[in-house]
Every structure is written in structure tokens, then in C-alpha cells.
Image (cartoon, helix red, strand yellow):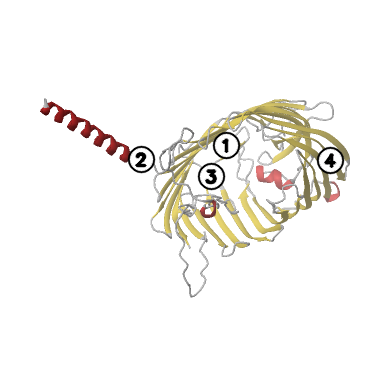
Amino acid sequence: MKLNTIFKQSTILTCLLGLGFAAHAQEPDRPVTLDSFDIVRDYRPILADAVKIRRSPDMTNKREYMPKLNYGNVPDKKLDINTGLKELKIMETPFSQIFDLKSNYAKLGIGNFNTILGEAYFAVEDYEDIRYGGYAKHLSQKGNLDDQKFSRQEVGIFGRRIFPRFTVNGLVGYNGFGTRFYGIPTDITNKPLNPTREAQRFNDIFLSGELTSNFDPNNEDAFSYSLKADGYIYKDKFDAKENSVALSGYLNKRLKAFNVGANVAVDINSIAGASTPDGKMNNSLAHLNPYIRFKGENYNITLGANIVSEFGDSSRFNIFPEAEIDFALVPEYFYIFGGVKGGVDKGSFRNFTKINPYLGPDFNIQNTVERMNIYGGIKGNAGATFGYKVKGFYRKIEGLPLFVNNMETPFTFDLVYDGDGDKAVKHVGIEGEINMRLSALVNLGGRLNIDNYTMVKQDEAWHMPKMRLAANARFNISEKLYIDAEALFHGVSYAREYEYSNATTPTAYSKSNVASFFDLSGGAEYKATKQLGIFVKANNILNTDYQRYLYYPKLGFNILGGINFSF
């Protein structure tokens, strides 16, 4: 009995000690009440506002102006941008050194057909607000046909000065192109009708200057403006000459959701030659294009007019409507656009001979009036790897220029025009463009044009193919090796062809096919060292025998190789 009592007392004492110990272990820092809770959560580090970095890295990558030069591409210098955030260390430097951004180079090459290439480019880029330099190029070739010669020269100097509110650009240069009338039509006895094959040479001295306002990020509603002056003196080896002085500019003001502005231009142009009246012709234009543009988040609407005055030896006043809409159905991916416009394209001896250098002395210069141009299409992209654009249009043209072989000297060309007044040439066409970046190594691009002309007086749109396709590809094999490829397809076109005998001069012509052709070209460049590289360029790889204009075949397979030096 006594043992049982002692056991009970010991058990009770042990329970009281355990409850006391548990109560002591759970004792809170402050008294616990019914309206007080302690909440425990994961630690999340948060910086105070005072130590946050609020400056974003500058990721802009602007390319400066470089003249377009053919036969090989000089790779751009790689710009390494380190956007990582790290501690800045202040160090004393004995002098300030300007970072070298120069992209100067010299290139020399030779190839078959007596091809000689010399090319140089230099620019001073030591300052952020000043850039100036120059370029020079020579390319000459001689084909297998008698007097099938070509020679081209380009020389120029340029400069840019950035001021706080505006930027000034300037360019002065000379372009020269020499060839011969090497086309050899024959009579019915296969006797050549062009025994002399005279030389032709074009000399072009030009200058251009522009003053443009700088964008002010702190005042997006500020006036934007530009003033530009252009001029050139253009001569051939004979009596033809063209002088032009043009002034143009624009003014734009943003007012909340829309922009108001105008483009204006005056082009004083004179042409001299044996075929012009009294040996001289004045063909000048004045343009005025006021507009208002509404711009929203997913749309852009422009309404305006194009007012053109032709003056000089003949005068004409034209007013054309101008309207365009651009709407994003799926922003950045799918847009629809359309519009209507009209205008006047200046007839220029300089422009025509750049397209066809075998224009004869009896040229006839007229302006081309686009009475109506209704167009529409779709465009968009899929990120930075795919972009596209498809456009269809309907045009009514007055004075469509066409090249035809001269009846008495078929190795030279005349200019004829179709469409006059109410009877205009109707031009229906489709244009398509595509650009793809398959990877960091492969870039592809292409352009397709399909054209159909309904003529008024002429039987055909002479020497104008109904289909043209151009494609290009670039393969960046490595940082040192680049490969380029280009393909060009022209559909069938038509030319006037006369039949000659020894005794008579032809009085009628027959419609002759200028066959379609496919021209494949390619090139590669290997950068052996930081300064030295080698290149190779091949044209007409398939050695296709084709001609763009009747009696003037192009060169066959030709290859050019050489070295370039960057400094």
C-alpha cells in the first residue's frame, strides 16, 4: 500500500515537471493574445531605391554612310558591346586615347577578259561629331568580241558635321564610263553594218549637300526640317550635254496625334545635243507636296496632294491626289496597306544613258506622267528572322519611254514614247520581296516583278521583260570566311529588228525576241589576318550567252581575284 502511494506521488511529480519544461520552451517574446500572430516567410533580398541601378546599357548600333562599291564585300569590323554590370574602378591616365573606329581599305584584283580592279576607301572617324573621307575605284574589261570594252571610274570625297540642332552632309565626286558601240548587225549577205565601232564616253561631275534637323528626344513635337542641294554636269563623247541644279526640302510639325508638313523641290535642267531644238532644250520641274498624316498605335493614314509644274521650252500644270493607309492586323507580324498617287518623272539624258549607254545622237527627251497609281498589299515579319512584302498595282502612264534600234544605224538606240492624253498606257504588276535569316550563318533574300503593259501605239513594251527575279544569299562560314551568291532571271522581251539589203533601206520592222536569261554569280572572301584578306568573284558562272539589248551580248564566264588590305 505504501509502495503504491509512493508510485502515485512520483508519477504526479514527473508530469508536473514535464508540463513546466514544455511551458518554458514555448514561452513567447511577448504576451500572446487572440489578435496577435507571428507570420514567418522566405527571405527575399530587396535593394533600397537609393542603390538601384537605373541606367540601361546603350544597345544602339548605327552604321555610317559608305558609297556602294561592287566586286567583293569588305567585312564590317566587329563591335563588341559588354552590357554586364560591374564595379567601376577609377584610374588616373597619363593621356586620353581616342578609340580607333577606322574602316579604311585598299583592294587590287585581276581576272580573265583583261579585267583590272583597283579600289580604295578611307574615312577619318576619330570624332563623334565629325566624319570625312573619300573613295576611288577603277574597273576595266575587254571581251572576246571586237571592241567589246568597258571602263568605269569613281572618285569622291564626303563629309559630315553634327551640330547640337542639325547635321550637315556633303559629297563631291566624279563618275566615268567608257565603252564602244560594239553591236554588229548584218545585212542579208552577213555583211557587218557597223564597221567603225565608235567609242563612247560619259563624264559625270556631281555634288550634293544636305542640312537636316536632329531629333530631340525631349521635344518630340518640335519642327523637323531638311534642305538639300544637288547638281551635276553630264557629257558624252559627242555633242550631248546635260546640266542640272536642284533644290529640295521638307518641313514637318507634329501636333498630338497627327503630323502636318510639305515637301518642295525645284529642278532646273537643260539638255544640249544635235537632236534638241536649236541645239538646246530646257526641261525643268517644280514640285509641291503638302500632306497631313494621322498616326496611331496600329495605323498610319496620309492624305495630301502632289502639285507639279513643268516649265521651260514647254509648260504643263498637274495636280495629283496622294493618299495612303497602313494598318496592323497583327502588330509587327501582319500589315495591310494601300493607296493612290500620281506624279511626273523628269526625262533625263543622264538617267537614260545609265540604263542604256548605246543611245544614239538623235535622242528625244520627254517627261513621263503617272496619271494614276493605285496599289495595295500586305507586309510583315516574324521576329528578326523573316520579313516579307507583296504589292499589286494598276498604273496609267502618259509618255512611257522605250528603247528601240535605230532604223539606219541599228547598233544605236532611239527613244520612243507611248501613251498620250486620255489614251494612256495601262500597267498592271505584282512586286514581291522576302528576306530570311535561317541562322547566324545564312541570310537569304529575293525580289520578284511581274509586269503587263497594254500599249496604245507601240506593238510591245520594247526591251522590257514581263518577269524579273533577283535573289541573293550570304553565308558566314566563320569570322574569317564569307561566301556570297547572286542570281538574276529576265524573262523574254521584244525588240524592233530590220532586214537589210545592199540596195535598199528598210521601211518596216519585224518583232524579234530577246531571249530570256539566267545569270548566276558568286564570290568569297577570306580574312587571312586582321589587315590582309583575299577575295574571288565569278560572274555568269553558267557561261550563258545572252543580251539585254539587241545586238549587244554580255560577257561570258569571267572571274576576278585579288587581295584587300584594311588599315
Indicate the amino acid at tag 4: Val
Please tell me which residue is depicted at 46% across the width and 54% down the height of the picture.
Answer: 85
Q: Is residue 333 above or below residue 527?
A: above
Counting residues from the start of the chain, the first of labels 4 and 2 encountered is: 2
- Residue behind mark 4: 308
- Residue behind mark 1: 547
Residues marked 2 and 1 touching at CB (< 8 Å): no
Report helix, strand or loop for mark 1.
strand
- Residue behind mark 2: 27
Indicate the amino acid at tag 3: Leu
Position of residue 104 measured from the top left corner of the image (x, y, whole percent): 52, 60
Residues marked 4 and 3 touching at CB (< 8 Å): no
Q: Nearer the viewer, mark 1 or mark 3?
A: 1
Q: Is residue 337 above or below residue 21?
A: above
Report helix, strand or loop for mark 4.
strand
Numbered tag placed on residue 145 in the rendering: 3
Indicate the amino acid at tag 2: Glu
Residues marked 4 and 2 touching at CB (< 8 Å): no
- Residue toward you, 4 or 268: 4
Report helix, strand or loop for mark 2.
loop
Dot 4: within a 10 Å radius of its alpha carbon, few (fewer than 14), some, or many (20 or more) residues? many
Distance from label 1 to label 3 (Cα)? 13 Å
Please tell me which residue is depicted at 83% across the width and 47% down the height of the picture.
Answer: 284
Distance from label 2 to label 3 (Cα)? 109 Å
Q: Is residue 161 above or below residue 358?
A: below
